[in-house]
Amino acid sequence: MLDDLDRRLVALLRADSRRPAAALAQALKVSRGTVQNRIERLLVRGDIRGFTIATAPEMEANRVRAVMTIAIEGERSAAVVRALKGFPQVARVHTTNGRWDLVADLDVETLAAFSGALDDIRRIEGIASTETSILLATL
């Protein structure tokens, strides 16, 4: 369970995961060692799964991003999710309710790569049907 210090630390890391431990410690009014120990504990427990970067919008301008909704046959959800997580083109997988069982966020460099990813994903055993929408612009 996260305490208040953990929550504040995670918030700072979300804003800038490259912020040095000394700067985090100063912002949180704790020692550098406390910050390092907290980060290590959060990593070991799986509360923090990794660090990432945010890119400028112009770097993303030519990428093809899409949302794929997926219906699963029978009780194959776990196997389908495992298979989807193995695709580098799948940025995230979400469970949902309603007609679709899963929503996959796709992110590829070209339309040809997008087409190939769709073909490969649709071949996963246990997928009954899919519907995909390309994201045209982020507002």
Image: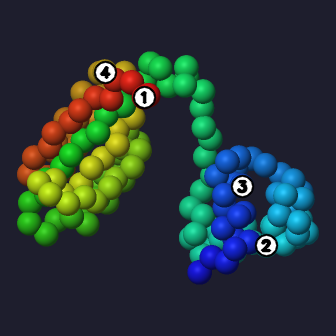
Task: Look at the picture and state if 31 lies above or below 128.
Answer: below
Is 73 or 32 nearer to us in this picture? 32
Q: Which disc, if any, is residue 111?
A: 4
Q: How far apart are marks 4 and 2 (CA)?
A: 44 Å
| Secondary-structure class at tag 1 | loop
Decide which of tag 1 and tag 4 comes sooner along the chain: 4
Looking at the rendered structure, the kind of residue marked 4 is Leu
Q: Is mark 2 on a helix, strand or loop?
A: helix
Query: Which of the two residues, 135 or 104, is positioned nearer the viewer here?
Result: 135
Q: In which quarter of the image is residue 37?
A: bottom right
Name the residue carrying label 3.
12
Q: Position of residue 61 (x, y in %)?
A: 47, 20
List the residue tagged with mark 1.
138
Residue 52 higher or lower than 6, as above or below: above
Going from N to C along the chain, the mark reached first, 4 or 2, is 2
Give left or right: position of 39 versus 125.
right
Query: Gap between marks 4 and 3, in whole Å?
Result: 36 Å
Mark 3 falls on what kind of element?
Answer: helix
Q: What residue type is labelled 1?
A: Thr
Residue at image coords 14%, 57%: 98
Q: Which mark is residue 37?
A: 2
* Three-letter code, disc 3: Leu
